[in-house]
Image: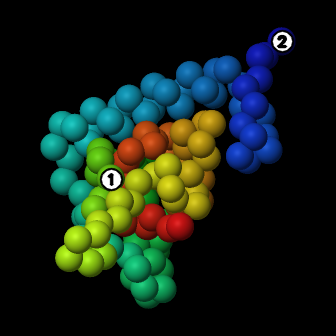
Amino acid sequence: MTESVADPDNDTQISAEQAQADEALRQQLKAMLEGGLKTEVEPRAYSHDAVLDVVSRLQKLAADDYAGKLAVAGFTAQPYTVSTTEDDEDEQACETCMYYLVHRRFCELPELMLPVEENWSCRLWRI
């Protein structure tokens, strides 16, 4: 019998094997980001057209082209900081993105579907 792990944010169950696979891939992605993989951090995809452009490019990638997904989505291994005023800054991190599943530590944007860390960021970040 396969043990399941609850994912209350997505109201689904994932198997212990899937949780292990997610963690292994997360570590692989982390190594790519920390190893100097060049990603398209900017321009950020704030407009509808910019989002469509990035999403269209992601849709052309193979599901297992993880380096390509990280690069096109502009992933960073730390939050992206935006200056909102002279004295104020906002951080954009996966943990505050609408596509982030907290308990699974996973990005459920259909074009990405990647295990991530809460403090990572990408240019498709949304509140």
Residue situated in front as seen by the camera: 36 or 90: 90
Residue situated in front as seen by the camera: 45 or 91: 91
Q: Residue at image x 56%, y 51%?
A: 100
Amino acid type assigned to the residue bearing label 1 in the image = Pro
In the current view of this chain or complex, which residue is farthest to the top?
Answer: 1
Q: Residue at image x 29%, y 47%?
A: 78
**Within 10 Å of the Cα at label 1, are there few (<14), some (14-19), or many (20+) other Cα atoms?**
some
- The image quarter in which residue 61 lies: bottom left
Q: Could you say whether the residue bearing mark 2 is in a helix, strand or loop?
A: loop
Q: Judge left or right: residue 6 versus residue 51.
A: right
Amino acid type assigned to the residue bearing label 2 in the image = Met
Q: Position of residue 14 (x, y in %)?
A: 72, 31
Pick the quarter of the image with the N terminus: top right
State whether residue 10 is above or below residue 27: below
Residue 12 seen in render: yes
Q: Position of residue 58 (x, y in %)?
A: 44, 64
Whole-angstrom CA distance, mark 1 to mark 2, is 39 Å
In the current view of this chain or complex, which residue is farthest to the front?
Answer: 87
First in sequence: mark 1 or mark 2?
A: 2
Q: How many marks?
A: 2
State whether residue 27 is above or below residue 69: above
Residue 122 seen in render: no
Q: Position of residue 101 (x, y in %)?
A: 61, 46
- The image quarter in which residue 24 lies: top left
Residue under label 2? 1
Residue under label 1? 79
Q: Could you say whether the residue bearing mark 1 is in a helix, strand or loop?
A: loop
Q: Position of residue 125 (x, y in %)?
A: 45, 64
Q: Judge left or right: residue 98 versus residue 52.
A: right
Q: Residue at image x 26%, y 42%?
A: 33
